[in-house]
Amino acid sequence: MALPQAASVLALSLTLACLGGGRVALGQEPSAHQQPSVSGEGETKPAPAPAAPTVVSPPSVSPLAADAEAVDVTLSPECRVPGSKLYTLARLVAVKAALKEKRPVRVLAIGSSTMGLGASATYPVKLETALERSLPDVDVVVESRGLQGEIASGAGERLRGMVAELEPDLVIWQVGSHDALARVDLEAFGSALDETVQWIKGHEIDVVLVSPVYTASLAKDTYYTNLVRKVQDVALREGVPLVQRYEAMRYLAHRNDKGEGHLLGTQFRLNDLGLRCMAEHVTRAITLSLLQPDPAATGSAGRPALTLAPPKDAASVKGPPAPTGP
Amino acid sequence: MREPNAVDFWRGLALVTIFVNHIPGNTFERYTYSQYGISDAAELFVFLAGWSIGIATRNRDGTPEPRLKTVLRLLSRTIEVYRAQITTMALALAMIAGTALLLDNPLLLEWHNAGGFFADPIQTMVGFVLLTHQLGFFNILPLYVVLLGIAPVFVLIGRRSRLAALALSFGLYAASLVFEWNLPSWPGEGDWFFDPLCWQLLLVLGFTAQDWSRTSPWLKRWAHRLVPVGVLIVLTGIVLSVLELRPDPLLVPDPRLVFTFDKTYLSPARLIHFLGVLLAFQTLYAVLAPRLGWVTTFLASLGRNSLAVFSIGSLLSLAAQLVRFWTGGGVVVDVFVVGFGLFALGFTAWFVEWRSRKPRLSSP
């Protein structure tokens, strides 16, 4: 096994150990007590499962640094963001089932800008490569589709058509840009998104949401920040993983701030970086979500699907009850 | 300039509806008829385009014009529409990029499928002229280019036998539904938003219906008798869309497109609903026209100049979207952008007619 892979396996199993002791964080930046250190709390008895937690925000998964705010070093240098800023996790049942059955994982990537720079480096291609790299011996097939229109008016319906056409195991959905551009009513947006996510999950297909981009000119736009929060709320309520593109890009923006904010195009370079990093960020969230304790693992079927995680760790974790949508 | 007539009037209404519906989230959206039915203005627009082809390819006394002339006429119209699509897309992309620069806001670059153009211009430029890269809301004209391109086949077959033209058209439609045939998008994955292989059926229905109604009293009689059926279909459509009742695409039997309400493939439910609308409203123009006064004149003038009005309308919708985003929207902004847009559509129609009336100036 190559060294980076070994490191990532180590990181993953450590994460898993942490999850046993870690409490739930609800899509926000975890506060100090939610950050079990990698070295200590892995062996502690898990606390009784809280009543209705759904999304677990893990601490840093870096095997090198126990600091909660340390960046995730498994990412490429320019894309490094602390895990707490990058994602909230939840279980991915359908993908796990596909892994268990040893069949290819079919992924439908839906988003407004599905392309990256250059033909060989488009987002779907990068995503497929990154997923296959982090899930060795697994065949991942990524199909991507642009989705025109607002979820609050009809795009959710078209998405259903796409899902029915491709019947994927996992839908990775960059959501919210078009609704933000049309400034649709936030309640209407939230309930339409909620409904569509419920529908996808109802058909035993996993969903990962990706929040819209961060850009300085919108940082003080309350409508926009509320819309980003709405996406978080829905991810939390429906118990689906969320890639916080907004938070991640904000972090990258501040880290890369070289005091040239006045120059035309600074935001555009950031956007470019955000696009380049998205495949990695999404992959990270998916890989970690796959290590979420399986509810079946606490019952009779004790073996987790993913061989990346040592089975005993997974079995020892008494995870929260199955987070299903209302 | 011809007098207002039913075709121009309804086409004008479809143009106004498309303009308003292409400003998503705006206050007036909920007052368009698209919100109260399974089909919408796009069906009406394509059907009436077919109807107009029927009128344009015959002389006034109903005798068909020479075949070669028909082919050349449709070819010339295809080129005109293609040119309109290229021009409006170029302007739209520049409007999006310009606004993104002005507001220092790259989110705008993600505007309905424009992202690909800015992220990957080399491939997308090729897709742009091949019509395989389409912006959201700018995907009706590519459909129209393909439909006009294949129209001569159906028109010429229809001269021999209307039934043969209809059968061929319906066969292609049904096969595309069952086997999910569509033209591909490129670069990027996926297919066209409006599948020409399915939507051609409406065009062919349009011109065969025009031809048939010209000669057959039987068709007219039955169309009148079936008005109640049309009304029933329209009412059903209202109930279904208000209650948001529609089949779940993952639960319907195969072939699923036959059962879902799918716009891309013009699924049968949309087609039946549109035919119902047609039956229910066929005689309404005669009732409305004298009572609406200047509204009739206005809508008919838009309908007479549909390509110019549609092109300007799509740019105005985009401008309205950008203004709404920049200002934050609200009723006042909506009244302003929609009001200004309607005025500009009217001006466009007037201007086109003024230009064609005016004796040509000698070239500079």
Image (cartoon, coloured by chain):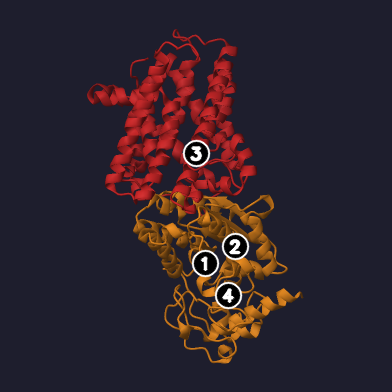
Chain colours: A orange, B red
Residue A248 marker? 1
Residue at horizontal 44 percent and vertical 14 percent from the top? B215
Q: Earlier in the sequence, mark 1 or mark 2?
A: 1
In this view, the residue in front, A42 or B235, is A42
Q: Which residue is mark 4?
A: A71
Residue B73's x, y, as percent?
Answer: 54, 17
The residue under label 2 is which amino acid type?
Cys
Q: Secondary structure at mark 1?
A: helix
- In the image, residue B315 sits, relative to residue B222, either above or below, namely below
Image quadrant where residue A20 sits: bottom right
At label 2, counting other C-alpha atoms closer than 10 Å, the crowd grade (few under 14, some 14-19, many 20 or more) is many
Q: Earlier in the sequence, mark 2 or mark 4?
A: 4
Mark 4 or 3: in front is: 4
Q: CA distance from mark 4 to mark 1?
A: 11 Å
Q: Secondary structure at mark 4?
A: loop
Q: Which residue is mark 3?
A: B266
